[in-house]
Image (tube, helix red, strand yellow):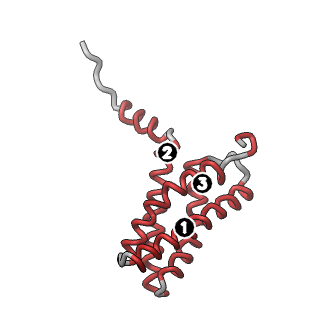
Amino acid sequence: MPEPTSAAAPASRIGALLARREVRFLIVGGLNTLLGLALFAGFHALVGPYLLALVLSYSVGIVIAFTTQRMFVFGKAAPAGPALARFTGVQLGILGLNAIVLTVLVERLGLPVLLGQTVTVAIMVVTSYFGHLLFSFRHREES
């Protein structure tokens, strides 16, 4: 006779999924990305120039993203101060790359600004994950 299905089975599958760093990054990063796009759209509507909106949205987003990624994705093994400095460095590099790609999409290819930023963000997510995994949140014992 087969065993009855347990209500705990779906919960254990969810727990196993959430134990994976990549899954947590997708969830937290997805929420941060949506917030970042909303901030970008809001700043673009308020201040006008899309590159200024990009810098402003990154300025707010860095604080939120560092906190959520440290808490839920990469852990607190690395001391907060050095991790924040490394995180900010990675984010500034990504901001520069984002500005270049966004400018090409908008100025050269004629995409609307919000569509261009949405496309650009998809590229930046992968860059961000590896930058933060390999640099921002590593600590000395892993180097």
Percent coordinates x, y for residue 73 in the rendering: 55, 48
Whether tag 1 and tag 2 are in contact, CB under 8 A, the answer is no
Q: Which residue is mark 1?
A: 97
Q: Nearer the viewer, residue 76 or 114?
A: 114
Image quadrant where one finds the N terminus: top left
Please, is residue 47 above or below residue 79 in the view?
below
Please provide percent x and percent y for residue 61.
Answer: 55, 68
SS at badge 1: helix
Q: Amino acid at mark 3?
A: Gly
Give the distance between the C-alpha atoms of the residues marked 1 and 3, in whole angstroms.
13 Å
For badge 1, the amino acid type reads Leu
Which residue is denoted by mark 3 in the rendering? 131
Q: Quadrant of residue 91?
A: bottom right
Whole-percent x, y for residue 137 in the image: 65, 50
Give the CA separation, mark 1 to mark 2.
23 Å
- The label on residue 22 is 2
Question: On screen, 89 above or below 47?
Answer: above
Say if 85 sits above or below 53 in the image.
Answer: above
SS at mark 3 in the image: helix
